[in-house]
Amino acid sequence: MTPRAAIFHLIAITLCTHLACGEDKSEQKVKVAPGRISWSVTRTAVIAPKRPEFVRAINGVMDRLPPFPKRPPSPSLNVNGIFDEIEGEGAIIIEAILKGSGAGVPMEGAVVVHGRITDEKSAVDLMKKGVEELESTFRSLFRVYGGTATIWKRSLDSAEPDEQILAARLLARDRVTSAVQSIGKLLGDPREQVAEAAATALGDMGDESAVPVLIRSMNPRALRSEVRAIEAMARIGGEEASAYLEMTAEGHENREVRELSRGALTRMRKKR
């Protein structure tokens, strides 16, 4: 090997070491590992899958899921499965949360599957169907998580609440203030978990333009809508939030709202 060739060979080895032969290690994605897996069966269930069958099915999901769309430290999926059966009608509820994202944004998914149970095989088949739906849910969530602000805004209109909630959290994390109005539309969602996530996201974002959005979202016939809006406003702060809370602290007809508003004002003033 000539001296010149040797130099180029050394450069190639060095580049390969730093870039993993064309792949920047800082951008490497990692596989999700199974975390805590719990399984329970209701007292009414005469026929139900065993815990080892559920654990094997969840481990299979871990093997099939694509790499996590970012590079978190040791991402793991905690899963809780519940199986119910009454007189041949079965149901499986699976809730899961991804830990270790390192971005302050939890990724959660939940599925509920119903079916007729006649024997052990049909019970296992129902369980497997629930696990397959969980896998599909997290594949979709991965796509949302790995997307851009444009994709997150579009995901606010998803038919799946898990995707809407994740999108709102990601937009809040990155302070995408142009999404305030879009997130605000979710405040009136009949699914409580979606409305709660929207209010929390606006509070996390901390942009004062969200205050009038929160005020308009209040439903005097739904106390919870007022409570979550006041809590979000207290975190955002600003003159408009302060003026509104002073008004409700003194003049709201509901004693609970008055007390909540006074507490919110106190917290806001301490932050100044």
Image (cartoon, rainbow, N blue to C red):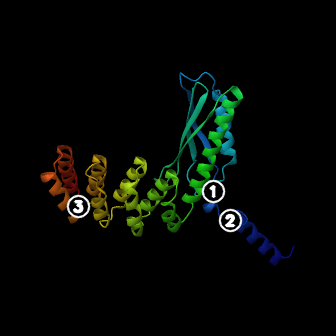
Could you tell me the amino acid type at mark 3? Answer: Ala
Q: Above or below — where is 41 with respect to 202?
A: above
Image label count: 3
Q: Name the residue under label 2.
A: 19
- Residue beneath disc 3: 241
Residue identified by numbered label 1: 29
The residue that appears at 60% across and 61% down in the rendered structure is 26
- The answer to whether one can see residue 103 in this image is no
Residue at image position (18%, 52%) is 266
**Residue 164 point in image, percent of width and height:** 48, 56
Q: In which quarter of the image is the C terminus?
A: bottom left
Taking the image as shown, residue 261 lies to the left or right of residue 47, namely left
Task: Give the SS element for disc 2.
Answer: helix
Of the image marks 1 and 3, the number of the one nearer the N terminus: 1
Badge 1 element = loop
**Is the residue under label 2 in contact with that under label 1 (CB below 8 Å)?**
no
* Identity, as a three-letter code, of the amino acid under mark 2: Leu
At mark 3, the secondary structure is helix
Residue 228 visible (yes or no): yes
Check the image and report above or below for 242 versus 37: below
